[in-house]
């Protein structure tokens, strides 16, 4: 029986000469990447400073739209960043951890880098025992962090049930989709997750240095990340002094100068 997916092999020239069985560490390079990288350097060489006008400045959002189609996010709801650790820091910096709702429920199954961010955040970190995440969520929980597919065991977590329990007590959920997006169906809006992160290597078949952050649209006005920068400003090119005046759109979750090294096409 012919396999519908086999024609995709031609899109990954590496496969002609090697067995590539480590996409969880680095994707096999897509055929079109070379041309995209050449296009990037041609823009830089020929357009010089005007290369910024080639969509580079908005690329964290235009590329986010490509990822959004894979994870079920709406147009303009996903921003690109350097890695998941930074996305986690950004989300955690949106909260005040000093009040009575100071709990961040997590588990050892979370990727260690996420855990390092959690423990450094100032939150009261509640490490749920294996299989006990839902029971660990209570009225003092501000945020629940969970991997959709856990990196150690490949277990698929029931995100819907976790979100329901969290919302019941007024808590929010950040889901790490790094090990699920591209491998199993993901629909952030249907699941109702509040934040989601993941990155370009692994099952999205990309190279390193690009991660995505989804934030539920109706939360935007209430979130003011302390991890911020001039790209999050409503008028970045006014170079205003003082505190940041956050952009109304998802740019409010950006930081400084973006990395325009992203591929534009999938
Ligand atoms: C579930 C999960 N989250 C995050 C990461 C990587 O995080 P970062 O992009 O900060 O390197 C990995 C890498 O293996 C992972 O498996």
Image (tube, grey):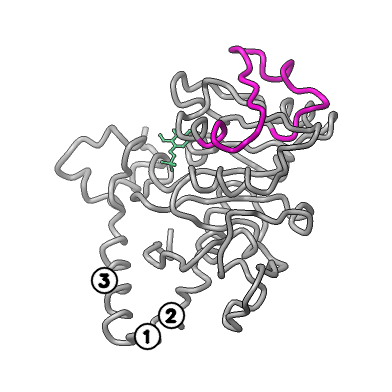
User: Residue 44: where, in percent of width, then height?
Assistant: 31, 79
Circle number at residue 38? 3
Task: Relative to 26, say whether 58 is above or below.
Answer: below
Circle 3/circle 1 CB separation < 8 Å:
no
Q: Residue at x 31, y 61 (%)?
A: 32
In the image, taking residue 190 as reference, residue 4 lies left or right, namely left
Q: Earlier in the sequence, mark 3 or mark 1?
A: 3
In the image, taking residue 244 as reference, residue 202 lies left or right, namely left
User: Residue 204: where, in percent of width, then height?
Assistant: 43, 45
- Distance CA(mark 3)–CA(mark 2): 16 Å
Judged from this view, the residue extending furthest toward the left is 17
Task: Relative to 27, say whether 56 is above or below.
Answer: below
124 and 16: which is toward the camera: 124
- Distance CA(mark 3)–CA(mark 1): 17 Å
Where is the C terminus found, in terms of image quarters?
bottom left
Circle number at residue 49? 1
Residue 64 placement: quadrant: bottom right
Which residue is denoted by mark 2 in the rendering? 52
Magenta span of residues: 117-143
Circle number at residue 75? none
Say what secondary structure mark 2 lies in: helix
Tell me if the residue at label 1 has its CB under 8 Å from ligand 1.
Answer: no
């Amino acid at each position: 029986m012919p396999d519908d997916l086999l024609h995709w092999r031609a899109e990954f020239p590496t496969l002609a000469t090697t067995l590539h069985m480590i996409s969880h560490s680095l994707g096999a390079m897509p055929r079109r990447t070379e041309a995209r990288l050449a296009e990037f350097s041609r823009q830089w060489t020929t357009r010089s400073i005007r290369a910024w006008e080639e969509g580079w400045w908005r690329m964290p959002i235009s590329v986010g739209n490509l990822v959004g189609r894979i994870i079920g996010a709406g147009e303009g709801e996903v921003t690109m960043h350097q890695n998941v650790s930074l996305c986690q820091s950004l989300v955690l910096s949106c909260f005040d951890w000093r009040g009575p709702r100071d709990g961040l429920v997590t588990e050892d199954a979370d990727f260690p880098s996420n855990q390092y961010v959690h423990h450094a955040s100032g939150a009261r970190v509640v490490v749920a025992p294996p299989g006990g995440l839902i029971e660990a969520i209570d009225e003092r929980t501000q945020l629940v962090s969970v991997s959709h597919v856990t990196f150690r065991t490949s277990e698929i977590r029931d995100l819907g049930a976790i979100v329901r329990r969290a919302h019941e007590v007024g808590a929010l959920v950040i889901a790490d989709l790094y090990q699920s997006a591209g491998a199993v169906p993901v629909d952030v809006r249907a699941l109702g997750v509040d934040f989601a992160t993941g990155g370009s290597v692994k099952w999205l078949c990309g190279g390193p240095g690009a991660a995505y952050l989804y934030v539920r649209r109706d939360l935007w006005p209430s979130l003011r990340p302390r991890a911020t920068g001039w790209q999050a400003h409503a008028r970045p090119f006014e170079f205003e002094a003082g505190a940041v005046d956050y952009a109304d759109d998802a740019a409010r979750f950006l930081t400084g100068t973006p990395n325009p090294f992203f591929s534009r096409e999938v």
